[in-house]
Amino acid sequence: MYAVIRAGGKQYRVAPGDVIRLENQGNGTNGKIEFSDVLAVSGEPGQIGRPQSEARVVGEIVEQGRGAKILVFHYKRKKQYKKLRGHRQGYTAVRITEIAFDGQSFKAPDLPKKEAKPKMVKAAEVEEVVKAEAKVAKAHPAKKAAAKKSAVKKAAPKKKK
């Protein structure tokens, strides 16, 4: 199941779950964008056509940003004319969530929720780790002394002629 939509002067072939990069779009309502300009819809396998009734494609905004820099260089030979400009095109990444037409609705599967990692470690946990390290250091004082002695380098023996 897929549809062909028009957005930002370009045409895109989309299916439920696809993420497409469009030219800057508004924020929509609650991060949702509805594309009403649907050019074609595929129904059963092997069939595609212009929707007879009202078709719609719904997506949710995933990200907004700016693309990579493009250098625009103007040059006229023998005239000492050079001009260099940079440009970064804005984009909106949209994840297609639903394609609906003729009373049918095809929805994308929900994405798994990301589990939030704790950003700060509790002070009690830090104290426990410090105490555990202190116990290990007290239990093995001979190992530390041996490690320090082996770290001292010895002079290389002199070569005989």
Image (cartoon, rainbow, N blue to C red):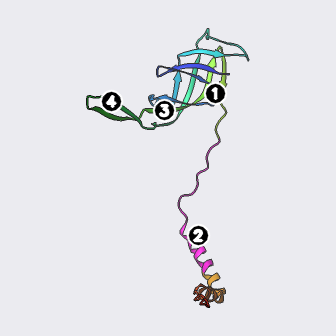
- The stretch of residues the image draws in magenta is 112-133
**Mark 4 to mark 2 CA distance (whole Å):** 64 Å
**Tag 1 residue:** 16
Q: Is residue 109 left or right of residue 22?
A: right
**In this view of the protein, which residue sits in the foreground, 67 or 19?**
67
Separation (CA) of disc 4 from disc 3: 33 Å
Q: Secondary structure at mark 4?
A: strand
40, above or below 80, in the image: above
Left or right for 39, reference 109? left
Residue 43 placement (x, y as % from top left) = 69, 16
Residue at the (56%, 16%) spot, across then down: 38
Q: Quadrant of the N terminus?
A: top right
Q: Nearer the viewer, mark 1 or mark 2?
A: 1
Marks 1/2: CA–CA distance: 45 Å
Q: Which kind of residue does numbered mark 3 sit on?
A: Thr
| Image disc number at residue 75 | 4
For residue 95: magenta?
Answer: no
Q: Amino acid at mark 1?
A: Pro
Q: Is residue 62 above or below residue 161?
A: above
Q: Earlier in the sequence, mark 3 or mark 2?
A: 3
- Depth check, mark 4 against mark 3: the one in front is 4
Q: Quarter holding the C terminus? A: bottom right
The residue to which callout 3 is attached is 92
Q: Earlier in the sequence, mark 1 or mark 3?
A: 1
Give the residue drawn at x 53%, y 23%: 34
- The residue labelled by disc 2 is 125
Q: Residue at x 46, y 22 (%)?
A: 8
Residue 45 quadrant: top right
Q: Amino acid under label 2?
A: Glu
